[in-house]
Image (tube, grey):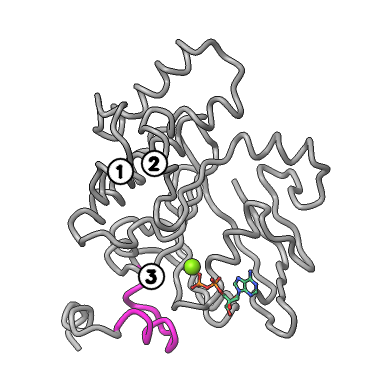
């Protein structure tokens, strides 16, 4: 479980995160939703330790991450997998080398064992046998799958995905969402996903927080997100003709 308590983050005069408190649940897709610029990426970067909050704590299974020394932080980092916006594969490395990368960094195992793990992860994301291809030879959806394989290579307890569907068509987006959801449940991972994609919200939103101008404005799940009595959330959700029709507006 990941907990955040009283998180405040500013950049100069820009108070980006305003006293955020919430819990992210294991085995679930925990969604952070909100308009562009609302603070989703800053919140995720604060969770993984790329930004230091001015106040507040980030707890990973009751361990206060932001107050640990370097070695202790590395220990928690070993349990994290990340899929950043755009997939961010290493272009000069093959698929196999990309997925191997975190294993070489964090595991001291014989090459053969690590290679078996790479092959297992590629098979899990339905990309068996593409080891020697370069990222430039892959479609957008395949790149995301490789990014997922790389993120789960070290068997993370926590998985962070910043806009995992950006740049994908709606059908491929749903396949990627489903894959992330299956993996989350199968391995009981605490998965945190930033998104503004309404399909994702309704498909995989087990636990949802809506951030509005840096404040936690609403909490809920995919069952009640369409029925919330919250103007800003409704403005966010029902901005398209499609979602208005779905609600019968
Ligand atoms: N490294 C940074 N330095 C200064 N300001 C930043 C930085 N990163 C984000 N911001 C600011 O934080 C706010 C929230 O940005 P962000 O978290 O990227 O929004 P979202 O991911 O919801 O679209 C914006 O006003 C942005 O300008
Ligand atoms: Mg963002």
Spatial separation of the CA atoms under disc 1 and disc 3: 18 Å
- Mark 1 neighbour density, 10 Å: few (under 14) some (14–19) many (20 or more): some
Q: What's the residue at 45%, 35% (across, down)?
A: 152
Image location of residue 158, percent across then percent down: 54, 42
* Prevailing SS of the magenta stretch: helix
Is residue 236 on the magenta stretch? yes
Q: What's the residue at 33%, 77% (across, down)?
A: 227
Label placed on residue 148 = 2
Q: What's the residue at 45%, 77% (across, down)?
A: 36
Element at label 3: loop
Which segment did they paint magenta? 224-238
Q: Is the residue indicated by label 3 positioned so its CB lies within 8 Å of ligand 1?
A: yes
Disc nearer the start of the sequence (2/1): 2
Whether residues under marks 2 and 1 lie with C-beta atoms below 8 angstroms apart, the answer is yes
Is residue 94 on the magenta stretch? no
The residue where tag 1 is placed is 179
The residue where tag 3 is placed is 196
């Amino acid at each position: 479980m990941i907990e955040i308590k009283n998180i405040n983050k500013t950049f100069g005069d820009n108070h980006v995160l305003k006293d955020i408190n919430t819990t992210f649940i294991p085995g679930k897709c925990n969604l952070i939703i909100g308009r562009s610029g609302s603070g989703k990426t800053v919140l995720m970067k604060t969770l993984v330790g790329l930004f230091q909050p001015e106040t507040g704590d980030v707890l990973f299974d009751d361990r206060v991450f932001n107050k640990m020394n370097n070695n202790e932080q590395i220990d928690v980092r070993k349990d994290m997998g990340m899929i950043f916006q755009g997939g961010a594969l290493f272009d000069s490395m093959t698929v196999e080398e990309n997925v191997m990368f975190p294993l070489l960094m964090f595991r001291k195992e014989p090459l053969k064992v690590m290679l078996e793990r790479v092959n297992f992860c590629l098979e899990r994301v339905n990309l068996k046998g593409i080891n020697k291809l370069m990222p430039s030879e892959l479609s957008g959806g395949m790149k995301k799958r490789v990014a997922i394989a790389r993120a789960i290579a070290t068997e993370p307890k926590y998985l962070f995905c910043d806009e995992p569907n950006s740049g994908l068509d709606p059908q491929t987006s749903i396949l990627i969402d489903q894959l992330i959801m299956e993996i989350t449940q199968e391995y009981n991972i605490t998965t945190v996903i930033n998104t503004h994609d309404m399909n994702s919200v309704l498909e995989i939103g087990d636990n949802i927080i809506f951030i509005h101008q840096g404040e936690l404005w609403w909490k809920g799940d995919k069952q009640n997100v369409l029925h919330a009595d919250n103007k800003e959330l409704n403005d966010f959700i029902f901005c398209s003709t499609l979602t208005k029709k779905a609600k019968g507006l």
